[in-house]
Structures are given as structure tokens and as C-alpha cells.
Amino acid sequence: MENEYVKEITSKSNDFSQWYVDVILKGELADYSPVRGCMVIRPYGYAVWENMQKLLDARFKATGHKNAYFPLFIPESLLKKEAEHVEGFAPEVAWVTHGGQEELAERIAVRPTSETIICSMYSKWIKSWRDLPVLINQWCNVVRWEKSTRPFLRTAEFLWQEGHTAHRTEEDAEEETLRMLEVYRDFVETDLSLPVIKGQKSENEKFAGALRTYTIEAMMSDGKALQAGTSHNLGQHFSKVFNITFLDRDGQLKNVWQTSWGVSTRLIGAIIMTHGDDRGLKLPPKIAPVQVIIVPISGKNKEMVQSKADEIFERLRCDFRVEMDDRDEYTPGWKFNEWEMKGVPLRLEVGPKDVEKHQVVLVRRDTGEKISVDEAEMNVKIKLLLDEIQNNMFKQAKEFRDSNISEVDNFEEFKKIIEEKKGFIKTHWCENEACEKHIKEQTGATLRCIPFEQDNVPGNCVVCGKKSNKVVYFAKSY
Ligand SMILES: [Zn+2]
């Protein structure tokens, strides 16, 4: 029975993408829905998202941002105002053409992102330098009509946050763009245990309508890249089109400088693909809906063990997210498998012998290690262990990533590594779009980012051989 349960997930090394879907479905994170390309986020998956929201939202507030809400619908004329922007999003926009029986005079887009509707309001709200900066964030859903979809990674509708800010000067906007990228890096590395590379997107990969796009890139455990968050310096592209002007201190009418930045439920996909194993999910303690699962192992002394387990539950409840699995209809072994599958960081076992010895047994999900702990020290020890698990998960992911970065200086080797070894390729690039395109066409790898951290060792472009001072990362991506 116990073995059969585990067998229900495909092995990660045999079929990574089937394993990914199995973990989502069996772990009860999400399910397919009757709507094409749309998923249902189940309570367990939604609890992960809520924990992520809380941690991120606190960081947004700490950096001076406030939440607001804008309409789901955007009139076609508004969406079309910024040319590059509409061109970038046109293939994915879902349109509303009817209201009830009546055909609408103007089509309405279901927001793929909210720059345009927010800019239309900013042009109304911003009049003077005293109104700046405007620092607004929105938690919402967006719709992008994707052709092929995968739960959490790419769905027609997804949840995210989008920050939209307006500033007096170009420097202020650039500072904000980089500040929010750093907020994302800190959140993703500290709370999700996902190591990322910070850098800039190429012209070709930047956000439609942006001056510059910055990104944090993570490596999944199949070696593919996942863009974990982006922050865009929009320059004055939108403010000129939407006429967002203010009277500056010097009495002159000027256009504001803007930024936008976002992360989405896609990060849940990144957590699954980075940390999960053949036994299922592995959740970082900081965002795990259940940090400690108590499994009483009663045998003949059912009442005694259960009352001890209840007492432990009460003592842990104030410090941790804890649940009790006292279902009679399942064996302890079955329960162990189920909670491992759901990625709970710590399992607490208590049996008759433990009650006698005034101890509990803790089992780590990340290492499988079993630790007997004196009841009196239980809370302190659990706190330490959760921190240790959080750090260990980051360390393991970082070691995996670093050992899967290949430095390459010729194109034949580049192709071979993409085919056989996977992972990121670190190489010189001449900053010419033609070379970037050539790589994409020949290998399927895209330029993930131009990292901020540069070795400053001159080299030659991996495609054309021209002198280059820029080292960049290429990879296949989600
Ligand atoms: Zn080149």
C-alpha cells in the first residue's frame, strides 16, 4: 500500500514534465478546469500563494508602495495607444465583443497587463512635482491567450502583482526599477530558496514598450531557465503617449518617468521544479501552508498518545503553521507518504515510547533525517530546524545551478552542451541582435540576461568572433 502510493508519481528523471504535472495534481496544488487553458488553484496551492503574497506585500509597503485596484477591461483605443506595447501583446489578447445581446461599439480587451489603463488615470491624477512619486501596486488576475499551456507556468489566466510608478526624473525611475528588482531577488532567494541571477534583458527580449527590462533568472532542476521576475524602466514611452505631465519646480511642463514590475503564480511552478523530488513536493518552510505535521502513532495506547499529541499541537500552534493527522482510516506509513508528497518541511511523530520518555521524533523532508527531541525543547528546536531546512534548500539549489553553468567560447561546443548537458551557457556576445537570433534559431536557446556581475575579461563573440566585453547567459527556458 505504501509503495503503491509513491508509485503514482512518475519518476523525475524518467519524465520531468509528467512528474511536474503529477506533483501538482497529487499534491492538490491545482487542477485542470473545464475552461481551455485555465486552471483551478486548490486550497493547498492557494495557501502557498497567500503566504507568498504576505511576504511580498510587506516588502512593497516597506518600500513606500500602496495597493489599488484598476478595471479588468481595457478599451481597444487605450490599449492601442503605445505602438510597441500593442504589437507585443496583440497575439495574446482576449476580446469582449458583446454585452448581453448587443454588439459593442468598441471592442474591450481583458487586461494582459495594466500599463495603459493605469497611465490613463495617472494623466488625470498627476499635475505637479508635488504629486510625485506615485508608487502603486495592484494584486490581480490577467489574461493572455496562450496556445500551449502548463499549470502555473503558462495559463490563459494567472494571478500576479503589477507595480506601476511615476517619477520626476530619469534617475529616480532607474533607481526604482533596480530597487524593485532587488526586492524580488531578496524575496525569491530568502523566502523561496531559489537562487537567481540578476541582470538586464537584451533589446530583443525586453518588455513591449519598455526602455530597459531587468530580470532575475532561475534554473529549474531539468536545467531550463525560468524568468522569475522582471522590472521595467518604461522611460517616457507611455507618459508621452498618454500625456502624463507635471509642472516641475522650475515652472516647466514635463513628462513623468515610469516603471512597472511584476511576479506571478509562475513562481509556484519554479518552487516545484527546483526543489521537488521523486517523493513529491518540497516546500520552503517560509511559504509552506503546513510547516509541521503531527502524526500520532498509537498502537495499543491510543488515548494516551492522542492526548499527548493534542497537547503538543496546542504548544506548537502559537509559533508555527501546524496540523494534526489523526485520521483512523490510514496507517502511519500512508500518512508519511502523503505529507512527504505535499512537501511539509517537518513531520512530528509521537508514539507510546516517546510519551514515556517525554520526547518527540522530528523527520526532515529535505534530508530524511530523524531527530529525537526533548519535549521541553521542542519549540526552540523546531524553529532552528525550519531555518536550517530553508537555508539547506537554497544551498542545494545553488550548488545544482552552479554546477550546471558551462563557460563556452565556440559555437560547436555551445550546440553540443545545449543538446547533451543542458543548463546555462555563459559566453561572450558582441551585443549584435543577429548573433542572438542565430543562436536561437540553431539551438532553441534564448539570451536569458546580461548579468550585472561581469568578470570584465575581454573575449570573442561565440557566433561571429568579434571582440566582446560582455559575458551573457543563454539557456532553453520555460
Ligand atoms: Zn557576434
Image (cartoon, rainbow, N blue to C red):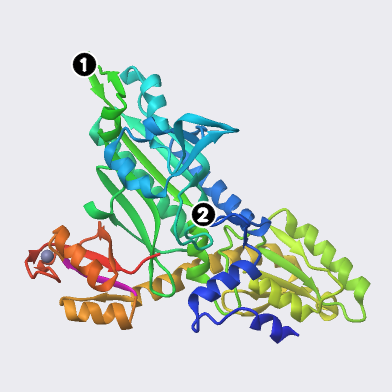
Q: In the image, ligand 1 is in what quadrant?
A: bottom left
Q: Residue at x 26, y 59 (%)?
A: 451
**SS type, badge 1:** loop
Q: Classify residue 256 as left or right of residue 436.
A: right
For disc 1, the marked residue is: 252
Q: Amino acid at mark 1?
A: Gln
Q: Amino acid at mark 2?
A: Thr
Q: Position of residue 415 (x, y in %)?
A: 24, 78
Residue 208 vertical placement versus 378 (above, below) = above
Residue 53 vertical placement versus 17 (above, below) = above
Q: Nearer the viewer, residue 229 or 151?
A: 151
Which comes before the other along the chain, label 2 or label 1? Answer: 1
Asked which quadrant contains residue 102, the reply is top right
Q: Residue at x 45, y 55 (%)?
A: 146
Residue 265 circle label: 2
**SS type, badge 2:** loop
State if disc 1 and disc 2 touch (CB < 8 Å).
Answer: no
Given this view, does label 2 or label 1 mark the residue nearer the observer?
Answer: 2
Asked which quadrant contains residue 420, the reply is bottom left
Does any atom of ligand 1 lie closer than 8 Å to the CB of label 1?
A: no
Q: Position of residue 380 (x, y in %)?
A: 66, 63
Residue 457 vertical placement versus 61 (above, below) = below
Task: Please give the range of residues in magenta.
Answer: 423-428
**What predominant SS class does the magenta segment belong to?**
strand
Asked which quadrant contains residue 389, the reply is bottom right
Q: Is residue 425 magenta?
A: yes
Q: Is residue 350 visible?
A: yes
Q: Residue at x 26, y 73 (%)?
A: 443
